């Protein structure tokens, strides 16, 4: 191998290293964003609110089969647990399931 060939190989290696590091850096950033989003979703669903779907008509006439609701969990810790308040949201008229 001549010295020119050695220099060409060095130049190719030095050019490919920043591309690899840039790719790995962006991959790491994407992983961090996904991890943060999953942690936030877990905290919200566990401690703040959770969406629910009513699969059967066991709660008729208050809730019908197929109704969707959001269960709010914060006030449970700050109120007396004597009664339960149920807020019902009607489905929009132009809703398509």
Image: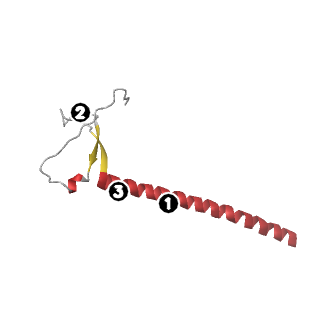
The answer to which image quadrant residue 26 occupies is: bottom right
The disc, 2 or 3, on the residue closer to the chain's N-terminal end is: 3
User: Residue 20's spot in the image, x, y percent?
Assistant: 65, 62
- Give the distance between the C-alpha atoms of the residues marked 2 and 3, in whole angstroms: 29 Å
User: Residue 58's spot in the image, x, y percent?
Assistant: 19, 37
Residue lying at 42% horizontally and 55% vertically, measured from the top left: 38
The quadrant of the rendering that contains the N terminus is bottom right
- Residue extending farthest to the left is 82
User: Residue 90's spot in the image, x, y percent?
Assistant: 28, 32
The disc, 2 or 1, on the residue closer to the chain's N-terminal end is: 1
Q: Which residue is under mark 1?
A: 32
Q: For the residue labelled by badge 3, is the local secondary structure a helix, a strand or a loop?
A: helix
Residue lying at 23% horizontally and 52% vertically, measured from the top left: 75
Q: For the residue labelled by badge 1, is the local secondary structure a helix, a strand or a loop?
A: helix
Tell me which colouring the rendered structure shows: secondary structure
Judge the density around disc 1: few (<14), some (14-19), many (≥20) Cα neighbours within 10 Å.
Answer: few
The vertical placement of 4 against 92, above or below, is: below
Q: How many marks?
A: 3
Of circles 2 and 3, the one toward us is 3
The quadrant of the rendering that contains the C terminus is top left
Q: Which residue is under mark 2?
A: 64
Q: Which residue is under mark 3?
A: 43
* Residue 85 can be seen, yes or no: yes
State the residue in front, 65 or 26: 26
The disc, 1 or 3, on the residue closer to the chain's N-terminal end is: 1
Judge the density around disc 2: few (<14), some (14-19), many (≥20) Cα neighbours within 10 Å.
Answer: some
Residue lying at 14% horizontally and 52% vertically, measured from the top left: 81
The answer to which image quadrant residue 37 occupies is: bottom left
- Residue extending farthest to the top is 93
């Amino acid at each position: 191998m001549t010295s020119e060939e050695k220099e060409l190989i060095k130049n190719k290696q030095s050019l490919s290293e920043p591309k690899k590091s840039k790719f790995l850096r962006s991959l790491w950033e994407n992983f961090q964003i996904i991890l943060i989003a999953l942690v936030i979703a877990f905290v919200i669903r566990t401690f703040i609110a959770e969406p629910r779907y009513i699969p059967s008509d066991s709660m008729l006439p208050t809730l019908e089969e197929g109704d969707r609701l959001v269960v709010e969990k914060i006030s449970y810790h700050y109120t007396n647990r004597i009664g339960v308040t149920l807020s019902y949201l009607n489905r929009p008229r132009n809703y398509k399931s």
